[in-house]
Image (cartoon, rainbow, N blue to C red):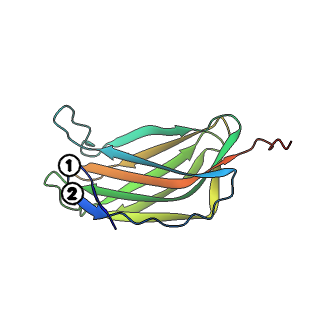
Amino acid sequence: MPIRGRGRGLPDWSREVKYPTLLPPKQKEWSVLLEFKKTDETDNRIPPFSIASTKVYTVEEGYRLLIKGAMCSMTDEHNMPLDVYCKVWLVITTPGFLGDRYFLMTDALTFVPSQEVKEGHSLYIYLHNYSGEYVSATVNLIGVLESLREEVTA
């Protein structure tokens, strides 16, 4: 197995493992990584007792997004796991509220059945910092982008 560099941060390496996919031809894997953190150029950390929000994705015409899961984590100003409860909200344009969850340090969310974001609709995420200090947050969403177009056969 080759070793692939990750860039800045820890760990700076990991083993690359290829897993087989069982997706039909009209589907493809979808994922997005959101980071609210301090860099050399910007400070996007979440202020104390505040809410950070962002538009994650707008589904293109002719597709639908099936959200399978999410991973959330928050760290304090010293880059240690945050020992204060935080809250994450996922919101879709329609029907609206998808779900919310309190978590301590880190949490994994699994959607069974998958949550659908229809074509032309958007997915938003909100993170509430209940602590008295600036926090960095990471959210990873995974799912399947499925084509709604009819296949043309010759």
Picture layout, residue 126 above or below residue 84? above
Image quarter for residue 71? bottom left
Please name the residue shown 62% across and 65% down the image.
22
Q: Which mark is residue 8?
A: 1
Q: Is residue 82 left or right of residue 27?
A: left
Residue at 80% from the left image edge and 44% from the top image edge: 151
Of 119 and 49, which appears nearest the observer?
119
Judge by depth and name the residue closer to the eye, 42 or 124: 42
CA–CA distance between discs 1 and 2? 7 Å
Q: Residue at x 28, y 63 (%)?
A: 14
Q: Position of residue 20 (x, y in %)?
A: 54, 66
Report the disc number at residue 146.
Answer: none
**Does residue 44 lie above or below 87 as drawn?**
above
Q: In the rendered image, which residue does mark 2 sit on?
A: 12
The residue most toward the left is 78
Quick check: 99 left or right of 76? Answer: right
Location of residue 99 in the rendering, given as x and y in whole percent from the top left corner: 54, 55
Q: Classify mark 2: residues with Cα within 10 Å, few (<14), some (14-19) or many (20+).
A: few
